[in-house]
Image (spheres, rainbow, N blue to C red):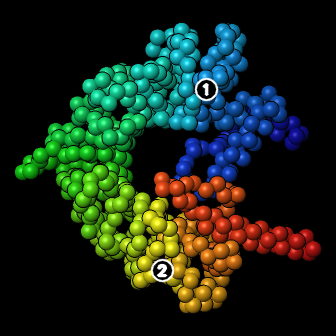
Amino acid sequence: MQSSAACKALLCQEILTEIFDYLSPGRPDEDALPKERLHRREAQKALARAARVCRALSGPALDVLWRVTDSLTALLSIIPSFTLLPSKQLALTRDVTDAEWAHFQEYACRVRELYTSSDVQISPSVWIFFARRCPDGHSLIPRLQRLDALDVSSLDPGRILLLCPTLWHLALTINHTSHRIAESSPIIDTVMERVQKISVPNLEGLRVTAASTDLPFNPDIMPYARLAHLRELEILSSCLFDKDSLQELLAFPNLRKLTVNPRFLGDMVGDELTPGFRALLDLKIIGYPTVVSQFLQWTSPPALESLAIEYADWTLTPDVPDSLPLGGTTKSLRRLQITFASYLLPSSLLELMRPILESDGMTHISITLAHLEMVLPITETELQTMADAWPNLVEFEIDVKEIDGGEEVLDYNGRPSPRSLITFAERHPRLVRLVWPFVETFDASGIRDMQNAPALGHGLQVFRSCIVRNDGLPKHREFATFIDRLFPNLDLSDVQYPVVAKSHYGRQRYKNWHDVEQFLLAIQTGRRSLTESRLTSV
């Protein structure tokens, strides 16, 4: 009788969907932990297997599996005649039957979120076919709510068929066919006109990117006043702001997230802007140091929790900031991310961060240096000052992407020792992600610190030392043993035989760290096998 009741319950579509929701892969996230990415792939496989068990499970499992679709190509591949041609272009090799189209629509109606950034080129004939099949005003994916990385260009206008009235988040990538803005503006105008006509009543988030970010958008192209209901707005291409457009942006009453790339700010000396951004929590600014400072000074978001600054360097004598131009935004700030492009580099990271040293509520700090010559802009003593300033850190990163001449040329004065890493770990028990600039393992005191490192049992999940000395595999093994003593719970789910990326100058990035990572994986695997064998013997 109980078995009969259970069978009846499992025949209910709502109950099955509720069960399969626990396997929902969710949307792809570049910042996810390695274990989370692995779990997402496993969840997709589990749902696919469940859909093949029987018809009763198939519908609910497919609903959850296709709810978030990572690729438009994967969806279109449901049509049997959709094929990759020798020209590396996807096309239909024959006409589509009514039964095949109905089968495709069953899957298309399941999709709520679509990510298209990794798709290959689709033949225009495919979009012509879809235009014939979709009645006027109807979308190819009728219940789509989130559309990410929609490529828009005069060469491939058919992708506009993906726009639909149910959209609440839209990300556009404008592919310019000309270096002249005047010729690319009609493309943008067409898309924005379509967005206004179809999607704006429900739209909450909009992101606009150009394939060439150096081409500025004129303020008139973005209809700010008609998008004032947005909660998220990201304009990654460089913008030309004047007083009117900036004031319209400040007046957005519900804006929670904003990304702007202000190439230039108009002459607003003596002009007062009405305060705004009352609801803004997340702000990212890309631009020259002086422009970034002006934007923060003129807007002063009062409730900001997350700030990302990407300093761009397009001049031979850049104006490097001595300290962050935060003003009154530090009280509520919890997350800070700073990226320095090319050779743009502050003389001292500690002085740069001084405006937030009193903000003990900081949880996420990330600093990326695109290029380093000889001197690390932070010493061991300064790292200890940061450790004392932010006791609640969950993520801390000082990342170096490129070293001119290799790690051997780094200046010795004040470089972080193993002791500084031990102290930092002890003072931050909540850390989940840590990227450390460098650990000096060459001198005698550093060797002693590694050999006598305490077994902290820290719960850190992700660690990387972006600069590792090329001292040979024995030294790398000692370094890995030291790291494992501090952080035995590292998530090494996606560690594999290293495929090393080469930099612009031909030098290999993170090569030595990959060697250390291999030793860490071996230590973890050995410890796990030993634990399992002991449990088996008991």
**Of the residues shown, which amino acid type is indicated by label 1?**
Lys
Q: Secondary structure at mark 2?
A: loop
Residue at the image point whose x is 61% and y is 84% from the top: 450
For residue 20, the mark is: none
Classify 10 Å Cα crowding around label 1: few (below 14), some (14-19), many (20 and above): few
Residue type, numbered disc 2: Pro
* Location of residue 4 with respect to 523 vertically, above or below: above
Residue drawn at (56%, 36%), measured in percent from left and top? Answer: 118
Q: Is residue 257 left or right of residue 492?
A: left
The residue identified by callout 2 is: 416
> Is residue 164 visible in this depiction of the protein?
no
Residue at the location (57% across, 16% down)? 126
Q: Residues within 10 Å of mark 2 (few under 14, many from 20)?
A: many
Circle 1 sits in a helix, a strand or a loop, which is it?
Answer: loop
Residue 193 at x, y percent in the picture: 33, 22
Residue under label 1: 88
Residue 378's quadrant in the figure?
A: bottom left
Which is more toward the observer, 326 or 452?
Answer: 452
In the picture as drawn, the residue positioned furthest to the right comes out as: 537
Say if residue 182 shows up in the picture: yes
Q: Are marks 1 and 2 in contact (CB under 8 Å)?
A: no
Quadrant housing the C terminus: bottom right
Percent coordinates x, y for residue 42 in the rendering: 72, 47
- Looking at the image, is 155 positioned above or below residue 412? above
Q: Nearer the viewer, mark 1 or mark 2?
A: 1
- The image shows residue 232, relative to residue 352, as above or below, that is above
Which of the marked residues, 1 or 2, is nearer the chain's N terminus? 1
Position of residue 157 measured from the top left corner of the image (x, y, whole percent): 44, 20
456 vs 227, nearest the viewer: 456
Q: Assign the N terminus to one quadrant of the image.
A: top right
Marks 1 and 2 sit apart, C-alpha to C-alpha, by: 50 Å
